[in-house]
Amino acid sequence: MARVVLCIPNFSEGRNKDVLDALSKAISESPGCYLLDVSEGESTNRTVYTFAGSPEAVVLGALNSAKTAYQLIDMSKHEGEHPAIGAMDVCPFVPVCNVTMDECVQCSKKFGQQLAEELGVPVYLYENSSQRDYRKTLPDIRAGEYKGLPIKLSEPEWEPDFGPSKFVPSWGATVTGARDHLVAYNVNLLGTKQQAHRIALNIREAGRGPKEPGCLKHCRAIGWYLEEKDIAQVSINLTCPSVTPLHVAYEECVRQAKMLNLPVVGSEIVGLVSLQLMLSTADYYIKKENLFVVHEHQKITLAVDRLGLNQLGEFDPEQRIIEYRISLKKDGSFVSSSIRQFVEQVSARSATPGGGSVSACIAAMGTALGTMVGWMTYGYKKFESVDTVMRQAIPPLNDATQKLLPLVDLDSDAYTDYMEAAKMPHKTQEEKAKRNDAMDVGLKKAVDVPMSIIRIANQCWPHLVSLAEHGNTSCKSDLQVGCKALLTGVQGAFLNVKININMGNIKDQDYCRKILAEAEEAVQMAERQCASAFAKMDDS
């Protein structure tokens, strides 16, 4: 699965198009970086860039844009309304997909250290990257702004985390760190600005002051009126949407509005949003309303509808959801190929795709057939009595299919990584050590992928056994084929695990013993469960 970090550098330039274009070019031409948005501010003389990529890619993109800014922006001549401390004023790293906050902390520290070393400028850490409470927030670090920086740098408590304690007039200083993805979110009201602001005061964490805090954590809010839309809005910044997600903010605004006898007429997300936030919104309404929605695109449709995101303008998921925008959902080359193409690739004179990829494909076919039998049972009056059973069986089988498909390509990738490691130079002792370490990592990856096939597949047996007992009997042969396919996928993956471990190149023999024992037990369990499913179908 792709690992994605969002990087959002703020530069103290919003008027010179040549400079802004150069910064855009520096980011977009950095390998693995996807420039998603550029928000220019002429009056503030500030531009915010949003780009995404792997942890390694975004650090490089941030460095390349900083080097460009160093050549083109002179803070000693800067004028603008927005508070600022440097040419690259702040550069946060935000986890998006398969990346932890700790990893983003490491991104910010790596970036900060390299920036300081290469440009000789002071760098401060903030938010999750800072270990000093008095310099955690951006306003605290930026207090005094650029003009107060020479004095600040001379004070021991404000020694930079990286770089010199000296004033660099053309640059100033840079603040970097890891934080949650801030979501700008507005809830629409048919009311007045004052009523919207009253709701904002009730919900925002700061409330009306220390003695009267609001009800939502990590929430900033104000009320305003959109003259062009003739509508009031509660304008919200969710600074930690993992704690206070979209649906919580929306539902609280609805609750507050009801107490004022005001109608809520949808909402809007400003900028980009993560897929996980949209799916968590859908899951909330699925549970609340006891709905049965399985497919991802249907969940997105539900979230858009329940939040009323199309009220003021079209919410296009392909443009507004980060993962879709940078094509993270795109399938690998084998999965996206036709059946004929895949079979011909398997039969070609090439080591990949091989048995591991085929095992993942066969297992996915097995879970897909199980899902089909569930759908061919659910919703028909004849089988109405088992609708609840189907609701429990279909989602995990569908999820398993979606998890198994990427493994078709990942198994091939793992083999390629191992072979690339084997080609590394190994003349000196140091080269031999590096090669052996790389081969060890590659071989473990070649073991981990088929083990993932086994683990995902074996979670499906209880649902297949349940379908064998309660499913549409007209689909009996389909389910039988599905069970055999899943069993074959497990057995094939086991053979791949076994041969990779028996190559004898993995240093950690304890790891090898544990994996082999787990895999052998898993195959036996799969055989028993498959037999159990067939026995139930034979009895029907």
Image (cartoon, rainbow, N blue to C red):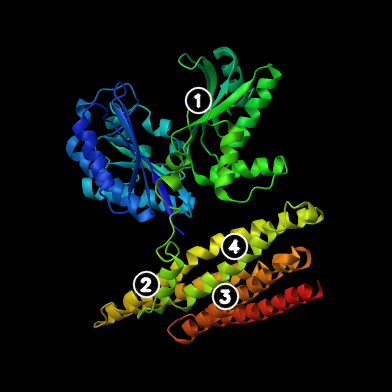
Residue 122 or 110: which is nearer the viewer? Answer: 110
Q: Of the numbered discs in the image, which one, if any, rests on residue 312?
A: 1
Q: Is residue 49 above or below residue 492?
A: above
Judged left or right of residue 289, residue 349 is left
Q: CA distance from mark 4 to mark 1?
A: 37 Å
- Placement of the C terminus among the 4 image quadrants: bottom right
Judged left or right of residue 253, residue 174 is left
- Type of residue at label 2? Asp
Look at the numbered disc 1 and give the secondary structure of its residue. Answer: loop
Residue beneath disc 4: 400
Q: CA distance from mark 3 to mark 4?
A: 13 Å
Q: Is residue 306 visible in this depiction of the protein?
A: yes
- Type of residue at label 1? Leu
Q: CA distance from mark 2 to mark 4?
A: 25 Å
Q: In the displayed orientation, state which residue is furthest to the front.
A: 474
Q: Is residue 232 above or below residue 272?
A: above
Q: Position of residue 371 (x, y in %)?
A: 64, 61
Mark 2, other Cα within 10 Å: few <14 / some 14–19 / many ≥20: some
Residue beneath disc 3: 489
What residue is at 78 percent from the left and 63 percent from the top? 470
